[in-house]
């Protein structure tokens, strides 16, 4: 298994594009969750990916697992909880207006993740273990489970990748600093937004691992390199960060230099924001190569 991700996966109900949530009457079912988005992105790019997490024994949980499996993601270690529901995310979709997001995750199956549900065989052989700050913020037990996962990653020699993915509906800035900042100090790769680092009061220069900063102008930098965002029409900005993570980590898994990792991260993000749902725009390997060629070279953009 090349990559192991651990985190919350929810059922997404996405309002028809351009319609405010309070006025929407038509919704499309999909899947949401930072780690599951990264898992789907890496799987489409040809990597073996395992998802660790919990869903409820309900139609939403079955739909989440079915969609992950359809992407080729290994869910054999997923826990199905008969006593807690699968989380639900309801949101609208606008290219240039604030997006309204409603989370229904209190008491969810994902929030009941415990350390004893994370076992050594789940990460054995993995090259990268990827988590976000969302999982440890769900509950105390999910926090302890995240710590356990990072401990196992260290024991097996896997690189630890962390995206803070700050969601203030889960806690105050102080709570995020207390729980997530210590995790960043244990990461080999940190993928963070400039605004997130400011909120967490973290200087990227003091983090021990590689720090990739996604700036407010949509550029990304690491190790003295800079990658500007590719100019594309934006349909929905949600999921761009997860797409960037998938592209960047894919480059790392293939041993590419950071310049290529940045470019592929930007390429995946550019494809994601042109589609409404979080995972619709995630490309396969050939699709990403064609897109990067179109972004950087004068070439035919119609694939015939």
Image (cartoon, rainbow, N blue to C red):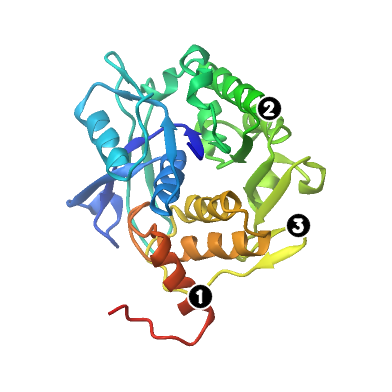
- Viewer can see residue 26: yes
Query: Where residue 248 sits in the image (x, y, percent)?
Result: 57, 54
- For the point 30% across and 56% down, the residue is 20
Q: CA distance from mark 2 to mark 1?
A: 37 Å
Q: Which residue is mark 1?
A: 231
Q: Which is nearer the eye, 74 or 223?
A: 74
| Circle 3 SS class | loop
Q: Mark 3 or mark 1: which comes first in sequence?
A: 3
Q: Mark 2 or mark 1: which comes first in sequence?
A: 2
- For the point 36% across and 61% down, the residue is 94
| Circle 1 SS class | loop
Query: Depth-wise, is mark 3 or mark 1 nearer the camera?
Result: 3
Q: Which is nearer the eye, 294 or 140?
A: 294
Q: Mark 2 or mark 3: which comes first in sequence?
A: 2
Residue 142, above or below 299: above
Query: Where residue 91 sits in the image (x, y, percent)?
Result: 33, 47
Q: Which residue is mark 3?
A: 223
């Amino acid at each position: 298994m090349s990559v192991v991700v651990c985190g919350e996966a929810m059922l997404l109900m996405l309002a028809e594009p351009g319609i405010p949530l309070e006025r929407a009457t038509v919704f499309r079912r999909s899947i949401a969750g930072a780690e599951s988005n990264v898992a789907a992105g890496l799987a489409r790019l040809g990597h073996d990916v395992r998802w660790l997490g919990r869903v409820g024994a309900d139609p939403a949980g079955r739909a989440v697992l079915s969609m992950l499996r359809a992407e080729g993601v290994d869910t054999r270690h997923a826990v199905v909880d008969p006593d807690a529901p699968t989380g639900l995310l309801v949101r609208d979709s606008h290219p240039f207006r604030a997006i309204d997001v409603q989370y229904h995750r209190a008491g969810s199956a994902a929030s009941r993740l415990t350390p004893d549900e994370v076992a050594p065989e789940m990460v054995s052989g993995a090259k990268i273990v990827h988590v976000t700050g969302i999982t440890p913020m769900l509950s105390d037990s999910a926090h302890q489970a995240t710590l356990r996962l990072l401990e196992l990653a260290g024991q097996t020699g896997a690189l630890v990748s962390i995206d803070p993915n700050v969601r203030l509906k889960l806690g105050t800035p102080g709570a995020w600093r207390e729980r997530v900042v210590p995790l960043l100090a244990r990461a080999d790769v940190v993928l963070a937004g400039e605004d997130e680092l400011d909120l967490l009061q973290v200087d990227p220069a003091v983090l021990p691992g590689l720090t990739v900063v996604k700036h407010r102008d949509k550029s990304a930098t690491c190790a003295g390199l800079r990658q500007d965002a590719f100019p594309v029409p934006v349909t929905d900005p949600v999921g761009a960060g997860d797409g960037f993570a998938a592209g960047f980590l894919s480059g790392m898994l293939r041993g590419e230099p950071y310049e290529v990792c940045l470019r592929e991260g930007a390429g995946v993000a550019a494809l994601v924001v042109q589609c409404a749902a979080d995972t619709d725009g995630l490309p396969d390997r050939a699709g990403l190569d064609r897109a990067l060629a179109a972004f950087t070279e004068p070439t035919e953009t119609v694939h015939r």
